[in-house]
Image (tube, rainbow, N blue to C red):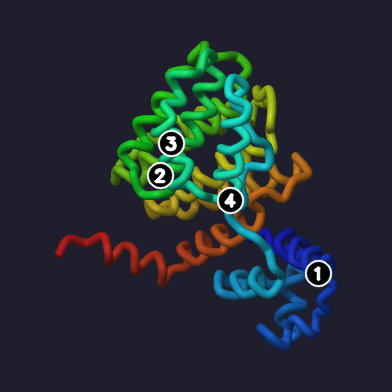
Amino acid sequence: MTGESVGSYLHQCRQQQGVALAALATRLCPLNVLAAIEQGQQSPSVAQLTQLYQQLGIVRNQPLPQSYPIHRLPAFSRQLQSWWQHQAYGQLVANVAAGDVLHQLTTDTDRQAVLYYYGRSLAAIGDVEAAQLHLRAGLMFMTPQYPQIYRSLDLLLLAAENSVSGLASADPDLSGFDRAVTVMRQGRVRDASANLTLVFYQYAQTLLNLNRPQAAIQYLREAIAWDEQQQSTYLLPDCYLLLALALKMTQPERAAFFRLADQPE
């Protein structure tokens, strides 16, 4: 882990909360350990990060910083954004399905937005098959299919579909992730770039689920760098926590455990 960057982030959060270093340390760990973490001299463990987040009120799993409105249905769009922001995924799914929303839309952009929120919400409530179906439908409305400049929603759909594929298959298709990351690295994105930290994060999550921590580490570091470039903190605590987990998985004893677990009985 880039100990210096996570330490700097934790230091900034503590200062914003007005919590003294010594006061925080009394609740968690020895003062010298906490000081070393903040100064980048020691990388925090998964457990330490989790406790620090709780003590400092750091929120994880934040919604997208920039939304995608449904222009054809402004009142419904506001309601959908409220469900999404409050993580009321079941309500969002029920209302999109019951309202026959998709048949009221006239532009591919609006259709993509609804299908993205609907597909992600289906995945969140555990309906992986339906989520994959609707996210793929969203990708069908990407016109042209291989543009020179992409909209951020195109890339989020590519990543979300591959992320759900990773839940449904032991050998998932990762080409959508690779395509989205290539476009981002080349700077071929038109809008809402702050949202795209999620692409790197979801790729790393999927790679960890496939027991590929070294590859996950690469994309988590890119996610953190992307946030810094966008002057954003979107998913930053999540990235640091997943990075700590990925590094733990690369330790020899952890790697040996996974090799043993993979052996047939």
Instruction: Out of 96 and 129, give the one closest to the viewer.
Output: 96
Q: Residue at x 52, y 11 (%)?
A: 144
Residue 207 image position (x, y, % from top left): 44, 48
| Visible residue check, residue 56 | yes
Task: Say which amino acid is labelled 2.
Answer: Ala
Residues at marks 2 and 1, CA–CA distance in whole angstroms: 34 Å
**Mark 2 highlights which residue?**
123
Considering depth in this image, is 213 or 12 the residue closer to the camera? 12
Element at label 3 = helix
Mark 3 and mark 1: Cα distance apart in space: 36 Å
Which element is circle 4 on? loop
Give the mark nearer the N terminus: 3 vs 4.
Answer: 4
Q: Can you tell which quarter of the image residue 97 is in?
A: top left
Label annotation for residue 86: 4
Mark 2 or 1 closer to N-term?
A: 1
The numbered mark at residue 17 is 1
Q: Secondary structure at mark 1?
A: helix
Are the residues flagged by discs 2 and 1 in contact, CB closer than 8 Å? no
Q: Residue at x 80, y 79 (%)?
A: 21
Q: Say which quadrant the C terminus sits in.
A: bottom left
Quote the CA–CA distance across marks 3 and 2: 6 Å
Q: Amino acid at mark 3?
A: Gly
Is disc 3 in contact with disc 2, using a CB cutoff of under 8 Å? yes
Image label count: 4
- 188 or 165: which is nearer to us? 165
Mark linked to residue 26: none
Instruction: Say whether residue 1 is left or right of residue 262.
Output: right
Query: Distance from label 3 to label 4 (Cα)?
Result: 16 Å
Q: How far apart are labels 2 and 4 at the CA level? A: 16 Å
